[in-house]
Image (tube, rainbow, N blue to C red):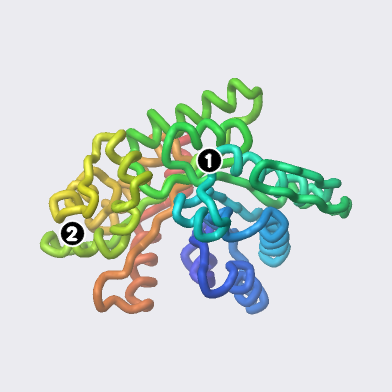
Amino acid sequence: VAMSSTLKLDRIWFGQQTFAPVVAGVGYASGRGHRAAVGTAVTVMPTTTPFATAQELRATSRLTGKKTCGYLSPGYPEIQRRMTGSQWASPLTATREFVAAVRSLLAGAETDIRGEYFHTAHQATGVDDSESCEIGLGVLRPGMARLAGEIADGFITWLSGAEYFSQVLCAEANAAADAAGRSRPRAVATLHAAPEVPDADVPDIVRGAIGPHLSAPHYRDMLESSGIPLHEIPTDVDLRNVADRGLFCTGDHQEIIDRANALAFAGADEVSIVLHQRPGQGLTELFDDWAALAAVHDPVLQRNELAS
């Protein structure tokens, strides 16, 4: 987290952690004087509860003194089965119930939501942290994008090219928000990258970084609908195609920034860059890559260009 102040990053995004909650690491860093805006993307709903989620968002925001982004996902059907005992017949309904409960709890309101998937009852606290926490959804396909437009403050996608992001995800979310008479959700795009990877190593880097996602049925469905066909077990040709289509950038630092800018011009209000370690690369070298990205990126200039 310390690198946020050093590199002037807008936000540190965390995936769901399996060994310790994000709030623990944020609390440690904040106690050492490193306070950065934080986002979690995504928290898989079957692994937690609305009450625990609201607590962690509230605590993270207070520890950092900055607005915290908490983005949620119903996760894989297999995760639902393992964590809850059965696959959710309607992930969209479960997501709607979960978000409603978290919003109510963050607002400090009397909460009594008796849903099909989540039952959340809690007395009013009168402590309203609504403005310090942004609730968003992880989005892959049109249905969840529409739900984000109806109920969320923002949405994030894990694997998407600029065209699909703009023409499908942003378009569906914005149309749903307009129909509901509410503000359009913030759009966050994720860009996976590993700088300056030799051509021969591209398939192995992509496979190691996002291979499990490329093999998952709902990711394959989304990618195939956007014109990127994949085998059930992605081949080297598939993995090169993923890189060629902009889902994983293996070029130099300027090319990574150019890809991020393309997502911004496609409608992303924020681009989360995920730098994957190359074989043999240590944390010091990874930090050097972040510094190199910062050196070729002028966020003030980019914002002015987008505003014009």
* Rendered residue at 20%/47% (across/down): 231
Q: Position of 219 compared to 62: left or right? A: left
Q: CA distance from mark 2 to mark 1?
A: 36 Å
Relative depth, front residue between 103 and 267: 103
Q: Specify the quadrant of the image occupied by residue 199.
A: bottom left
From this view, report whether residue 176 is shown above or below residue 285. Answer: above
Position of residue 165 measured from the top left corner of the image (x, y, whole percent): 39, 36
Position of residue 105 measured from the top left corner of the image (x, y, whole percent): 77, 50
Tag in front: 2 or 1: 1
Q: Position of 67 compared to 250: left or right? A: right
Residue tagged by mark 2?
203
Position of residue 156 measured from the top left corner of the image (x, y, whole percent): 48, 45
Disc 2 crowd rating (10 Å Cα; few below 14, some 14-19, many 20+) is: many
Residue tagged by mark 1?
89
Point out the tag, 2 or 1, that comes first from the N-terminus: 1
* Rendered residue at 33%/40% (across/down): 221
Q: How many marks?
A: 2
Position of residue 243 measured from the top left corner of the image (x, y, whole percent): 22, 50
Disc 1 crowd rating (10 Å Cα; few below 14, some 14-19, many 20+) is: few
* Rendered residue at 80%/51% (across/down): 121
Indicate the secondary structure of the residue bearing disc 1. Answer: loop
Q: Which amino acid type corresponds to the residue marked 1 in the rendered image? A: Ala
In the image, which disc is placed on residue 45? none
Relative depth, front residue between 92 and 104: 92
Relative depth, front residue between 18 and 46: 46
Q: Which amino acid type corresponds to the residue marked 2 in the rendered image? A: Pro
Relative depth, front residue between 261 and 82: 82
Q: Does the rendering let one see residue 65?
A: no
Indicate the secondary structure of the residue bearing disc 2. Answer: helix
* Rendered residue at 60%/31% (across/down): 150
Q: Does the rendering let one see residue 185?
A: yes
